[in-house]
């Protein structure tokens, strides 16, 4: 919560008008928010579908997913078949894929967001060329069966997927792991 409050303070550029905890209370308890976030992230459902099941508005579910996603990311992704191992960084994912001979898939996933207010700097950066909507993108690495192994940072919607791969250091990390695997194979 402190990290979220710091991010909001940075975005506003000032302290809050209302006291913390003021305003409407959450309509979903924490366990429901976690379950809804896991369902959305695992099956890539639009936020409106689980919102209908829980009987809440889509924006309520979107807020819940945005609250829970950083918590799940900080915990790391469980390795399929190895419940005790967790993948926390891109280097962990690439090393796991090289060691276990796992096929990785890289995708730029878009999430719709509200349109920023008028006359605010950077308003056009969130307009996605593909969706023609306001969106944020995240780079997601999955295995051959579609299970999420790593999620990159969010970036504005108009950033191209290949630009994100270069700026997030995915190319360099992949090249380093490929060189390590080639070196190991040459020694055998």
Image (cartoon, helix red, strand yellow):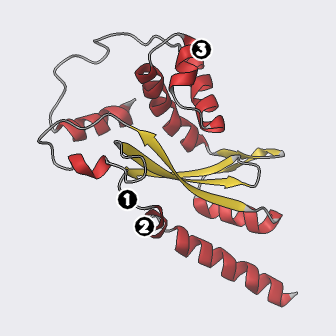
Distance CA(mark 1)–CA(mark 2)? 7 Å
Which quadrant would the N terminus be assigned to in this image?
Answer: top left
Q: Residue 53 carries which label?
A: 3
| 38 and 76: which is toward the camera | 38
Q: What element carries label 3?
A: helix
Q: Residue 136 carries which label?
A: none
Crowding at mark 2 (Cα within 10 Å: few <14, some 14-19, many 20+) = few
Residue 176 higher or lower than 135, as above or below? below
Q: Determine which quarter of the picture holds residue 49.
A: top right
Is 184 positioned to the left or the right of 71 in the image?
A: right
Residue under pointer 1: 159
Residue 139 higher or lower than 134, as above or below? below
* Label located before the other in sequence (3 or 1): 3
Q: At 57% across and 37% down in the image, what residue appears?
A: 72
Give the percent coordinates (x, y) of residue 91.
61, 64
Give the percent coordinates (x, y) of residue 152.
51, 53
Is 81 positioned to the left or the right of 52 in the image?
A: right
Is 127 positioned to the left or the right of 136 in the image?
A: left
Q: What element carries label 1?
A: loop
Q: Tell me if label 3 and label 2 are in contact, CB under 8 Å.
A: no
């Amino acid at each position: 919560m402190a990290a979220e409050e710091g991010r909001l303070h940075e975005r506003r550029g000032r302290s809050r008008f209302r006291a913390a905890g003021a305003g409407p209370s959450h309509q979903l308890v924490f366990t429901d928010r976690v379950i809804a976030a896991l369902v959305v992230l695992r099956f890539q459902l639009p936020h409106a579908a689980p919102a209908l099941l829980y009987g809440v508005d889509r924006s309520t579910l979107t807020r819940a997913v945005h609250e829970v996603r950083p918590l799940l990311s900080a915990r790391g992704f469980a390795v399929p078949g190895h419940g005790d191992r967790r993948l926390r960084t891109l280097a962990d994912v690439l090393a796991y894929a090289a060691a276990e001979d796992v096929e990785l898939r890289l995708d730029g996933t878009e999430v719709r967001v509200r349109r920023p207010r008028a006359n605010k700097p950077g308003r056009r950066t969130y307009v996605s060329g593909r969706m023609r909507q306001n969106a944020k993108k995240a780079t997601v690495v999955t295995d051959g069966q579609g299970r999420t192994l790593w999620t990159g940072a969010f970036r504005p919607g108009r950033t191209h997927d290949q630009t994100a791969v270069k700026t997030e250091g995915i190319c360099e990390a992949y090249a380093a792991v490929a060189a390590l695997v080639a070196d190991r194979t040459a020694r055998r």
